[in-house]
Image: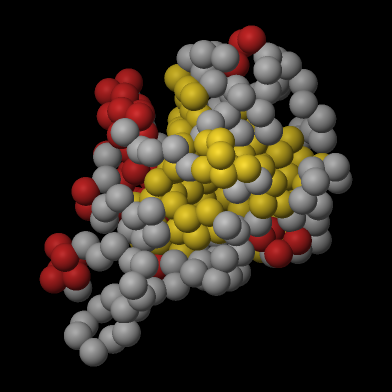
Amino acid sequence: MLGRKKTHPAPALEGGVYALTPKSSAKFLPNVVLCAPDDFAELWRLGEGVPPSPNPMNPAFNILRKQATFGASYSFGPQTSKCIGPISEAPVLVQRCVAAAQQCAVERDVGPEKYAVAHCNWYDGGKAALGFHQDNEPSTTKGLAIYSFTFLDGGPAYRYFTVSKDRAGKAVVGEFPLPHRSCLVMEGAFQEELYHGVAGTTRKAFAGQRRINVTVRAWEQQNGSAGRKRKANVCFDPGAEHAA
């Protein structure tokens, strides 16, 4: 059963669809993507080399969470996550997440090629957090599902993902204790009606937890044959282009 308050330790979350409003739901998928210790380590090492992002509320300080994107530069609010390469050059864990999202797209009769951008977040300890927001940027395809993959190392076997009706996070409709190798699929009018975030915690148990999130979105881009308009913020994969 999905709760609206955090409890520790968190109960195991059952797989399935959770209705959050009449128009919005979240589908929880456990054990979706394979992740060996070396796979996690590879992506974590990459994150260690990613420069920190300035805090949009106070640029003199950096946020604890690191971020980068494969496939495109991703802008949200006052922040921009720079493209660090095409999907084909991403660590294996990122490629598996994209492949999983594309497979789900096929099952929904959606063109898998739309899912070609993966945004990565690195959380080193419980204090690293993500503020409440909506993934409704013009560069994303509205109405299509968004896939959020979680990978954990150390600490508790979960990290809470909170969904609220307001940006302040006061009208919580769901607290999802997401475990290692899981995927939360945001569906329907989720990005228009609801806000989501990962609150920081000072609990000692989470101090040594490392969390990686890979979010795969459908992207508004035109990157096929010559003559088609190309958006400047997209990192193109020449190999994929020649294969088309």
Where is residue 118? Give x, y as percent: 40, 52
Q: Along the line of sight, which residue is nearer the eye, 174 or 132?
A: 132
- Quadrant of the rendering where the N terminus is positioned: top right
Q: Along the line of sight, which residue is nearer the eye, 200 or 16?
A: 200
In the depicted structure, whether residue 111 falls above or below residue 191: below
Where is residue 197? Give x, y as percent: 66, 42
- For the point 68% across and 17% down, the residue is 202
Q: Along the line of sight, which residue is nearer the eye, 65 or 184?
A: 65
In the depicted structure, whether residue 53 falls above or below residue 111: above
- For the point 74% across and 55% down, the residue is 194
Judge from the rendering whether residue 169 lies leftward or rightward of residue 120; answer left or right.
Answer: right
- For the point 19% across and 70% down, the residue is 241
In the depicted structure, whether residue 96 falls above or below residue 243: above
Check the image and name the residue furthest to the right. 171
Where is residue 124? Give x, y as percent: 49, 24
Asked where in the image residue 13 lies, by quadrant, the reply is top right
- Quadrant of the rendering where the C terminus is positioned: bottom left
Q: Is residue 146 visible?
A: no
- For the point 51% across and 50% down, the residue is 147
Q: Is residue 87 visible?
A: yes
Check the image and name the residue furthest to the top. 204
